[in-house]
Amino acid sequence: MAPPTKPVLENFYTVSQAAIRLNLRAQDDPSKKGEKWLRDGVNRKPEDGPPFPCTRMAGQLMFSDSDLAWIAENGRNIRPKRSGRKRTWSTRRRPDIAAKPEATAEQSAKSVA
């Protein structure tokens, strides 16, 4: 039997530091860019894919070096649930709205002739 290995203490980063480390935002950028994506990844539902690994220490969400490596490898090309513009109620109910610009062009051509 192999001798037990000593535990290794990894570096831990806050959400803000992790976003900078993953190059989701620049260090001098005061915005919260990238932090929401990390938090959403941690809170992801199982049907949307595996959640991001993390640790909670003293009530804070923390990421280790190995957590960030996993996120960098597996977090690529994750598509948001909804992409594109939100359809308004009128365009969902009345598909003929998309045809109106063509109809007006035909009507204007008839009126000119």
Image (cartoon, rainbow, N blue to C red):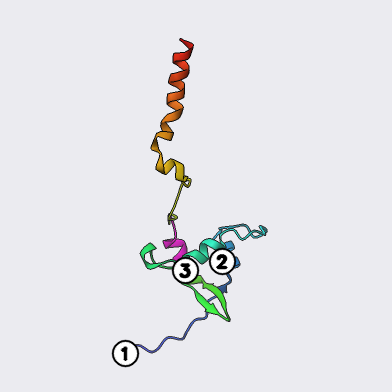
Q: Is residue 75 left or right of residue 19?
A: left
Q: Alpha carbon of mark 1 to alpha carbon of mark 3: how far?
A: 39 Å
x and y percentages locating residue 17 in the rendered image = 60, 67
* For residue 33, above or below residue 12: above
Residue 61 higher or lower than 94, as above or below? below
Q: Nearer the viewer, mark 2 or mark 3?
A: 3
Residue at the spot x=53%, y=78% of the render? Answer: 56
Q: Secondary structure at mark 2?
A: helix
Q: Amino acid at mark 2?
A: Ala
Instruction: State the residue position of label 3.
Output: 43
Q: Secondary structure at mark 3?
A: loop
The residue wearing badge 1 is 1
Residues under numbered marks 1 and 3 in contact, where contact means CB atoms less than 8 Å apart: no
Which residue occupies the foreground of this view, 8 or 1? 8
Query: First in sequence: mark 1 or mark 2?
Result: 1
Count of marks placed on residues: 3
Magenta-highlighted residues: 68-77
Q: Of the numbered discs in the image, which one, if any, rests on residue 71?
A: none
Q: Tags 2 and 3 in contact by the CB under 8 Å rule?
A: no
Crowdedness of circle 1 by 10 Å Cα count: few (<14), some, many (20+)? few
Q: Which residue lies under the disc numbered 2?
A: 18
Please name which of the two marks, 1 or 2, marks the residue nearer to the observer.
2
Q: Residue at x 56, y 58 (%)?
A: 23
Residue 48: name its quadrant. Answer: bottom left
State the separation of the CA atoms marked 1 and 2: 38 Å
Q: Position of residue 38 (x, y in %)?
A: 51, 64
